[in-house]
Image (spheres, rainbow, N blue to C red):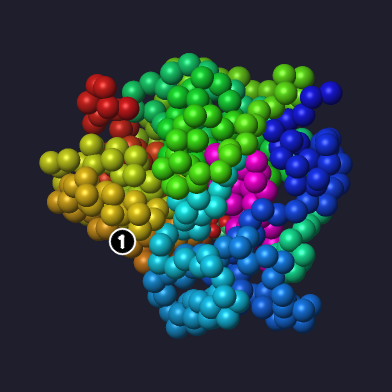
Amino acid sequence: MGMTMSEKILAKAARQSEVKAGEIVWVKADIAMMHDLLGPWLIDGGFRRLGGRLFDKEKVVVVSDHCTPPATVQQADILKFTRDWARNQDLPYYYEFEGPCHQVIVEHGHVRPGRLILGTDSHTCMAGGLGAFATGIGSTEMIGVLLTGETWMKVPETIKVVWDGELPHGVYAKDIVLKTIKDIGHAGATYQTLEFSGSAIRGLSMDERLVLSNMAVEAGAKTGLIEPDEKVIKFLRSKGVTDEIDDLFSDKDAVYTRTLHYNASDLEPQVACPHEIDNVHPVNAVEGKTVDQVYLGSCTNGRLSDLRIAADILKGKKIANHIRCLVVPASQHIWMEANKEGILDILTEAGCIVNMPSCGACGGFTSGVIGAGEVVMSSSNRNFRGRMGSPDGEVYLGSPATVAATAIEGKIADPRKYLLQGVR
Ligand SMILES: CC(C)[C@H](C(=O)O)[C@@H](O)C(=O)O
Ligand code: SF4
């Protein structure tokens, strides 16, 4: 019987010729990734008690992103601990103030098709957009991975999500993933892999594919995979990756638990409403809802193409009087590219504030959290109570285009009316 992509990657990681969904295997990690919040400062005690020797420091990547720039003394202490730990361990790969870890490890070439990537963050699954089996693990489990390079894993079943056809004007990967999660439900894919395929998915840029894999965990999935193709190879070559790249695809007779089929040309802009990720409606159902803040950023939708779309919409316009519009590029590299293209000028002239790349207010960590009674429209990935600050605030989620259109009106708005024909 054939194997799915995730079975193939886990078979390789388990050094077996084949594995089947449901089987428990011991797997070897290609990359162990930690961030400041759930990394060294939490695990150091246990790690040292058990010997304190890394299995392979070339395979350990640490990124400080959640506490950057520190807004409290406690965050500064966590950051210092993390930085000192990386230095004491003589780690070749430690990044800080560069942006959210998921974007940083993609940009630095740590993510490659066929790799097994384990990280102490639920959105580690984002790396699946390049064809890596990538998943979040707990900090305690990470102690074992750091010491031995291994962990056990139950091979997940796979749900196939097929999007064929062409996305209409003003509709994006974010709309695809919100609609998919609405149908699957916030726990509908628990411990399963979501495998995205179809002509609409193949048509997406690298930036947009990462939106889908990033949000797989919002349906409860272990990871979100997309078959790597020539776009992935081109992207990796541009990042200086010269080694052979695994050719990975699910076999024709691979077994799926279910297959969902969609026609992308029927899709409209979608909005996830408070306080659940699967409380998703077409934008027209919530159009006109007054907001206090808009947030364009995060590892989900703070990439260059996202900032470009927002700049296309906001060029020569002003954001509404009563709101704040925070722009948080998903990495320092993106910040610099956006600057070169004049995107940051367009956005600041429209009245937006450009913050430094970090997790920022996405998870309610640093600058830009919301107060009681405040409403935010965000391009990030979670909207549960208290996600971006006060438990009495409200978080709506949409595409960067929906966020930019909302910034102009100060009310949730349909982006299609602001986009020139031809600008997707
Ligand atoms: C704080 C961290 C553990 C968390 C995660 O695991 O995803 C955060 O990045 C988030 O997006 O909620
Ligand atoms: S989802 Fe938000 S908080 Fe979590 S890693 Fe991404 S940017 Fe950071």
Identify which residue is drawn at 60% across, 47% down. 125
Query: Is the residue marked 1 within 8 Å of ligand 2, measured from its CB?
Result: no
Is 94 in front, or is 264?
Answer: 94
Region rendered in magenta: 114-141
Q: Image quadrant for the C terminus?
A: top left
Q: Residue at x 58, y 38 (%)?
A: 245
Q: Amino acid at mark 1?
A: Asn
For label 1, the SS is: loop
Give yes or no for residue 15 being in the magenta stretch.
no
Q: Pinpoint residue 169: horizontal percent, then vertical percent.
A: 34, 23
Q: Position of residue 231 (x, y in %)?
A: 46, 32
Judged from this view, the residue extending furthest toward the right is 23
The residue carrying mark 1 is 355
Q: Position of residue 378 (x, y in %)?
A: 40, 48
Residue 373 visible in the snapshot: no
- Residue 214 to residue 176: above or below: below
Which residue is more in the foreground, 387 or 93?
Answer: 93
Quadrant of the rendered structure where residue 53 is?
bottom right
Is 135 contained in the magenta span?
A: yes
